[in-house]
Image (tube, helix red, strand yellow):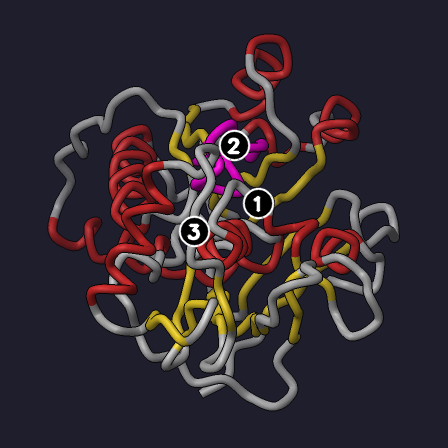
Amino acid sequence: MGRKLTIYMLDGSATGPKTIEIGNWSGKAIYCPRAKLKSLLSRQEFDSPGIYFLRGQSESYEFDESIYIGEAEELRARLKQHIADRDFDSVICFLSKDEMLTKAHIKYLEARLISLSREANSSYVENSNTPKASRISEADISDMEYFIEQIRLILPTVGLNSLVVAAPHSVQSVSTEDNDPTYRIKSKSLNATMVETDGAFVVKAGSQANISTSNSISEGWLKIRKKLLEAEVLKKQGKYLVFTEDASFSSPSAASSVVLGRQAPGPVSWLNQDGITYKEVQESPNNI
């Protein structure tokens, strides 16, 4: 069954601040790039309690993004504080339109979302610890878990994949469609194809990978290559390793680093059929 999701671009720009709502849900999301956050904080919604994700660039090649998850009884004051003390590119806040969220509710949401993000292993989680979920009633737990499911639906619409379960650590078969975005590795010596589908980055069967690895490659990518070799998803054929079946990764950097055998930032290592990098495609105004 389909779901109605309404995205309203507050300044008419695809890359600017926006509100996001889901039909028959009492919650609301507000997304904003850091550069426009100060002016946006005058909105009445930021008087409310809520939960928020700060998104930034990960310093680890194992992830394309870093996140910090927090809660606040007044979002405006907390976000003003973070503008001064944290490095981030954008923020998305989740609040209640009917003021149903209490301090106990948002503490529960914070603990659950940090835990789920760590389990998904798709983003670097900056929170130094995972707080213990506050004690709320069974009925409230049901309401908050439903709230979390709506957060899961909304986050990928603003390019945030922290709750999308990473697949590279356990090789999985993922179905792809003909209209899924397709990219080729930027290399003169290798032929490899990647398809982006449902939050996963799938290197297609028949793609080639370097046999050797450089000293620059991280331990995480080496472990993934080892698992792929042990599962015979990667097999030596001549002077290359070849994917014997489709293999799913949590990020384009995971896919490119495993294919090339070195640290290779995925957003600039994968090109579409027009020679445009994945990064440029994602930053295009047409990519909403």
Whether residue 24 is visible: no
**Extent of the magenta region:** 51-67
What amino acid type should be assigned to the residue bearing mark 1? Ala
Q: Name the residue under label 2.
A: 58
Q: Name the residue under label 1.
A: 264
Q: Is residue 257 above or below residue 55?
A: below
Q: In the shown orientation, is residue 63 left or right of residue 276?
A: left
Mark 2 or 1, closer to the camera = 1
Residue at screen point 36% across, 60% down = 149
> Where the N terminus falls, by quadrant?
bottom left
Classify residue 99 by image quadrant: top left
Observer-nearest residue: 42 or 155? 155
Describe the element under mark 3 as helix, strand or loop.
Answer: loop
First of labels 2, 1 by sequence position: 2
> Disc 3 versus disc 2: distance between alpha carbons?
26 Å
Observer-nearest residue: 201 or 260? 260
